[in-house]
Image (spheres, grey):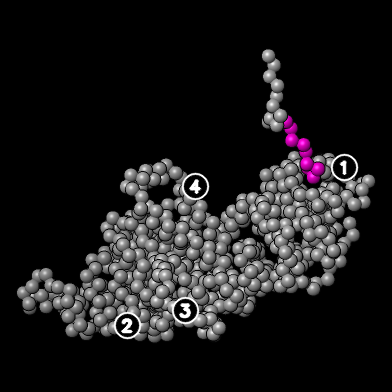
Amino acid sequence: MTSRKRSGSGSTKRPKEKVVYIYELLCRGEDPSADSPEFWNEFFLLQPNFESLEDQISKLNNEQLQVVKPNLNTLFQKCIEMLDTSREDHPKRLCNSLQTLCSLFYGIFRKCNTDASSNILNEIFGHETMDEWLKLLMQYCNRILLGDVTENARFMCLKLLLVLVTGTDVGQNVLFEYLMMHSLFDAFVRLLSDPTFRAQHGHDIVILLTILVNYRKHEATNPYVVQLSILADELALNGYGQMISQSLIDFCRQYIQSLNNVQSSSWFSSLSSMVGNMFVSDEGCERVQQIKANNGLLLALYEAVHLNRNFITTLAHPQTESSAPPSPSNTLSLTQPTPDLANAPIIDMTQYPTNLLVAVFQYCSIVMQDNKNESSIANLKLCFLILTCISEDQYANSMMHDSNLTFKVMLHRAQMRHRKLNVDRVGKSQPLAATLLDLLVEFIVSHLMKKFPMELYLLCIGVIHRILCYQKRCRVRLNYPWKELWSALIGLLRFLVNQEQTLVKKCNIFHLSLQVVNIFNLFITYGDTFLATTNSYDELYYELNREEKVFTEIHAMVLRYTTMPECEYKDDVIKLLNALVNILAIVKHFQNKIKEWLAEQGLSTPTEEQILDVVRKNYDLTLKLQDSLDQYERYAEAPLHSSFFQAMVRDVVNDTRKHIYGYVKEAVSVIPEQDVLLTTAVTASTPTTTPST
């Protein structure tokens, strides 16, 4: 008996969309508009099919490209004509032309990236006629961003720009030149200044600015670098900072929730999760991917603090969605009744960051716990470079050391065998400089490992040195438990001595040791200008004598290397030998005094207070005055870190490229087509002329 096919079965072939049929005609070299004057007006009312257009472009070989090139040029030009917002046209045509351009550019770039022999980018855009059309595209994009258009169109315009800047490596993308000649910086600033536009498009704008700023920044004049460095619009800068802080705060919130979930789960599920994670590659785990996702906005933060001194003033602003930074005149409206605080619900917000600087500190404390993969190490290096720029800024230092500006910051600490973590992870309310020092101390004590991160330690010690130089220069007496810092630094020196044979083959341990010893020399020589109490000096000398074995071993190690003719670090060895003079003199002086006192008292095991009393009574020693202890080399990106930032920008471009396709594809479902026109939009006044086809 024969069975009859059911209607609607999978064997029924779906009819081909009209727009797909048109793509096929175009990519065969045929002209579908030959017999229809209204063809293009009707074409842009059809919903684009992204996969089909990209698939057709990817199939083209070099010979077929020569046949199809006129049609691709025509499609490109007709799309741009539809972007003219001065035309009284159906708004759907504007959105569809933007989506078609996204798909067209995406397909062309993908063809370039996957087919090394293809020269499709230059074949289509490498002549004077297309040069004029690309210039016109930038002018129309500027009009759309500032114009009276639907939010769907503005959304798609920004996605198109992201497709353009992430199509291939930044240095090889010829389309960047048009974005340099026709800067969209003013449009980006206006959108960031408006809270409504910022909420919808702020992330895209910040990523765009970050990538554009890094285009040949050290080779030629980049207008985005120049304009970002002199930007003084407080609303725009605050909006820029808000986009970064929101991302970091969300990351911190997810991390805290994951910790709470682990603590509330049973020991068996925790063990299962731990065993399961042992078989997952570090680069592929969810936490690493979340960290990599923050590279773009962290890079944006770096560019802002590095280039624009005005941005520093926004670091401590409460990061709430408002049109203006907080000020005494607008913190409480006179028209609003006084709230009843007695009946207000109690919400524990101490565990979440309250401003950008707090968010950065808490984020760093999370990232520095993951040191097993290159992605997290690169992310942490970027964090330390940001902290370096901040610690060099006079205003940032004055803000962080302001005793009237205190915050409770939750710094996350790694679990280690030799210490017990405090259950209450939220610290006391203190100036941000103290929190920053807590963060740096935590890094020092938690990264003493065989795979020693030398570069990160140099950056960390450099930030500490800059903070101390500010305190010495401005005579700021920060109320801080310096003993924790001294213990951490001595522990670092002890590790370097113990691991000398292994580390000296890989890195210059003498340079790092010199930086650490010079921090102690800074305390010894200038401590009276910034230590909060006289007892701090006593505690410093007590710690130096308690750990005298460490300094004696370093001195012996240095003497050994001074006699080695083949030592490649000879200059740093000699500098370290000279830097140890005062510390060794202090140790020798007080060791003799302590022995004399013990002999007089007939004691063998004195208490800490007894040793401190001996120290207080025997400050009669002469020390050598050392130069340039409060000087440091100002941070410069090039040439030392140029390759790092090139790799970081490449990662941001690749990561954005992976995600942008899905955003463009689902744009219609994300934002309704019947989006209302915003009356607050500002229409660009730049006149444009359409070049002849």
Where is residue 57? Give x, y as percent. 75, 44
Q: Nearer the viewer, residue 585 or 285?
A: 285
Say if the magenta span includes residue 25.
no
Circle 1 residue? 30
* Crowd tier of the residue under label 3, counting other residues whose Cα lies within 10 Å: few below 14, some 14–19, many 20 or above: few
The residues bearing labels 4 and 1 have C-alpha atoms spaced at a distance of 46 Å
Of the numbered discs 1 and 3, the one sitting upstream in the chain is 1
> Please, what secondary structure does the residue beneath circle 1 have?
loop
Dividing the picture into quarters, in which one does residue 278 lie?
top left
Of the numbered discs 2 and 3, the one sitting upstream in the chain is 3
Where is residue 463? Give x, y as percent. 43, 71
The answer to whether residue 91 is visible is yes
* Crowd tier of the residue under label 4, counting other residues whose Cα lies within 10 Å: few below 14, some 14–19, many 20 or above: few
Dividing the picture into quarters, in which one does residue 653 lie?
bottom right
Q: Amino acid at mark 2?
A: Ala
Say if the magenta span includes residue 18.
yes
Q: Which residue in the rendered view is the most extreme toward the top?
A: 1
Circle 3 residue? 339
Residue drawn at the location 69% of the way across and 60% of the way down: 155
Using the image, determine if residue 353 lies above or below residue 670: below
Circle 4 residue? 284
Total number of numbered discs in the rendering: 4
